[in-house]
Amino acid sequence: MKILSFNFLRPLLLLGVLFAVGGITAHQIVYSRSWYAPLEVVVYPINADSSIETHNYINTLSTDTFAEIDDWFKTEAKRHKVPIYQPVKVRLGDRVDSVPPPLPVDKGVLRTVMWGLHLRYWVWRNTPDNDSNLRRVRVFAAYYQGEDDTPLAHSVGLQQGLIGVVNAFADTRQTPQNNIIIAHEILHTVGASDKYNSFGGPEFPYGYANPNREPLYPQRYAEIMVGRIPTSPYSSYMATSLKSVRINPLTASEIAWYD
Ligand SMILES: [Zn+2]
């Protein structure tokens, strides 16, 4: 009897894996956006620069650190008249001892797709628990000491797999801004899009919390999918906490928030 060679089997296996992943993904996308019960979010901290300072910062984290994210989602759901009291429930997960694969510098389609598969493989290998992922978002928070005026690599949120990768500063003063980034990436996983203009500022009108405000400037709030408060058509500043951030109607419709 002839035995199928491994070279022939491998593409079939890979196809099988892709179909299985695809099937799970479709279910995740439906369940995560149904909003009938709180969407569970687990934040797994990573000491990304292996420093003692970052280690000590991670020791200060608890589920309480992220409570303002839960509260902010509650307030926004109420403002948008969505009939759910608590849209998300964020908790601290176990530490992860590996760093996620970095986003490719060259953002060609093929490289990005390969990176996405690599990331999902990494997530599968490094999720420290066996809970179901059908209705939960996994956020891998890579903490760094960082230097002033040197931005960290971009954070990402993927609807495929409900996965967020957040690069954040390991500094207590930075925690409220880290929570903005975590909320932003959670929203990507449930279908929200970025609303930056080509200069990285808020795009008018979609990147404004209140594009109908009179006078238009200065705006009082940042839209979450930009995180910056516009002060003129050409200037804006980063919101310092979720207290000055809102979800605008476009983002609300992207995440299937209907009243
Ligand atoms: Zn984004």
Image (cartoon, rainbow, N blue to C red):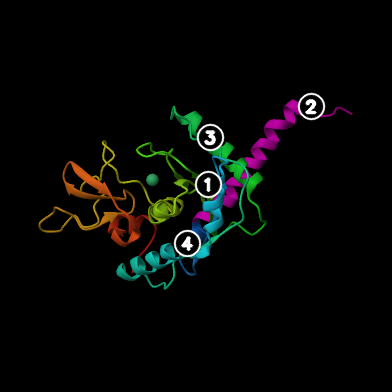
Read off the residue under disc 2: 5
Read off the residue under disc 1: 53
User: Could you tell me which residue is drawn at 63 percent across and 59 percent down?
Assistant: 132
| Image x and y of residue 18, in percent | 61, 41
* Three-letter code, disc 4: Thr
Residue 159 lies, with reference to residue 35, above or below; the image says: above
Main SS class of the magenta portion in the image: helix
Q: Earlier in the sequence, mark 1 or mark 4?
A: 1
Q: Residues within 10 Å of mark 2 (few under 14, many from 20)?
A: few
Residue 254 lies, with reference to residue 101, above or below; the image says: below
* Three-letter code, disc 1: Glu
Q: Which residues are magenta?
A: 1-29
**Nearer to us: label 3 or label 1:** 1
Would residue 173 be seen by someone viewing this image from the given angle? Answer: yes
* Three-letter code, disc 3: Trp
Q: Is residue 18 magenta?
A: yes
Would residue 187 be seen by someone viewing this image from the given angle? Answer: no
* Three-letter code, disc 2: Ser
